Amino acid sequence: MDQHRTIIEPFKIRTVEPLTVMTRKEREPLLAEAGYNLFMLPAKYVTFDFLTDSGTTAMSSAQMAAMMVSDESYAGSRSFARFEAVVRSLTGHTFVIPTHQGRAAERILCAALVKPGMKIPSNNHFDTTRANIEYVGAEAVDLVVPEGRAPSSTFPFKGNIDLERLRVFLQENRGTVPFGMITLTNNTGGGQPASLQNIREVSKLYKEFGVPFIIDACRFAENAYLIKQREPQCHDRTARDIAMEIFSLADGCYMSGKKDALVNIGGFIALHDKTWVEQLRSLLILTEGFPTYGGLAARDLEAMAVGLEEVLDEKYLSYRISVTRYMAEGLNRLGVPTLQPPGGHAVYIDAKAFLPHIPPHEFPGQSLVCELYLAEGVRSCEIGSSMFGKRTAQGDFIPASMELVRLAFPRRVYTQSHFDYILEGISEVVSRKESLRGLKLEYDPPFLRHFTARFSLL
Ligand code: F0G
């Protein structure tokens, strides 16, 4: 047993990229110019980019080497065969369909299998999943356990599906459920894992009702490692073994490779049975590409093949999960409340509790996002009223139920000293948090407000 308290990065650095270093004074006019919206800010002005963990990973020398020997043939490339073999041996699913990212897989599945009026259950659907389901006239139904909706609950598996509600749902909607899902980890609920026990029960229920079971497997390795840590029967199993059991419980899966395949672009669908395969491949050819490259260069398939193996290295997973816990505990020690318990890929600050003097219609989350940038050069993402607030027909603004700020950590990119530096700066923000001001919405676009909205300081 390793007795060290310090987390070390289980890799050496061999290619480096300079870090932007700026002062608060230099950042102030840039933020004003971006309309106090960090999505509008050029990345070159950001020091620590925690906007997303998606597609932001650092690749390994083994991935780079594999990319150099890729076979860029249009049809039947050697790189596809290698990628297909890795996905088959991990998931146990025979039919592997590459896509350029997760939402392309979602679009193809929905276009082929989902009809208006149908319903698809999950713990929580991610935004793009929900959007793709709704786009074809169907309904995305969230059935997460009650603990998953309670920010301060420390329940270890807040990504679990409520089995009672799922049974009732399946009884009431016979014949209208093209497939059932679970999202691992549950990103929308805070990067929270589902337990192996829960996934087994969910699988059993879907089977009982004859509903195919499809996993959104973006962060399957983080979920498997959190199961190993938190589920008593699994402490002695490897993350790979747990992941393989998870996949074996489903009829198929799809994945955004930009997370746990450790790549900057890529994704896939994998299925056990061939019933849907021809239809999915036809749609793939229409918009993504031939079935052996699916909208990717073969070098991207090579990088994913290596990444899917590297991600299950337990030294990597232990470091990865420790970083998130370290940041959550560091913030909590400073008096910054976060969603509990720490999940896999991100820390979610409860801005409503942290800045009670800023009312929801003045965007406390966005105010904190701006301050973290000004103070530290940190780019984070508001998940609150800027993203989910609604306007009534009369023009009144209805705030979101929670005001969260997500710090999502790119994989293998930042070091322990970066995280210590950030915590040091945040302790200074805490000491003068009463001086933080709210924001006024100046430009309110009709769709996806958070990407292009503009604010001014109150
Ligand atoms: N499913 C989940 C659970 C996700 O988190 C994402 C992306 C997708 C599907 C879609 O995958 O981006 O490759 O098309 N999540 C990113 C995020 C964007 O920042 O959480 P994609």
Image: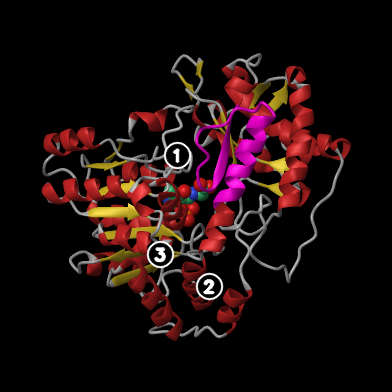
Where is residue 108 drawn, in percent x and y? 33, 58
Q: Is residue 325 left or right of residue 81?
A: right
The residue where tag 2 is placed is 303
The Cα–Cα distance between marks 2 and 3, rounded to whole angstroms, is 19 Å
Instruction: Pick whichever, 105 or 434, lies toward us.
Output: 434
Q: Is residue 38 left or right of residue 211?
A: right
Give the amino acid type for the residue marked by disc 2 in the picture: Ala
The Cα–Cα distance between marks 1 and 3, rounded to whole angstroms, is 24 Å
Q: Secondary structure at mark 3?
A: helix
The residue where tag 3 is placed is 240
**Image quadrant where one finds the C terminus:** top right
Q: Is residue 417 left or right of residue 366?
A: right
Label 1 C-beta lies within 8 Å of the nearest ligand 1 atom: yes
Where is residue 116 drawn, in percent x and y? 22, 42
Label 2 C-beta lies within 8 Å of the nearest ligand 1 atom: no
Q: Is residue 347 left or right of residue 221?
A: right
Q: Secondary structure at mark 1?
A: loop
Q: Residue at x 51, y 66 (%)?
A: 313
Instruction: Pick whichever, 342 or 404, lies toward us.
Output: 342
The Cα–Cα distance between marks 2 and 1, rounded to whole angstroms, is 27 Å
Instruction: Pick whichever, 110 or 255, lies toward us.
Output: 255
**Is tag 2's residue or tag 3's residue first in the polypeptide sequence?**
3
Q: Secondary structure at mark 2?
A: helix
- Magenta stretch in the rendered image: 321-350
Check contact, mark 1 vs mark 3: CB within 8 A: no
The residue where tag 1 is placed is 188
Q: Nearer the viewer, mark 2 or mark 3?
A: 3
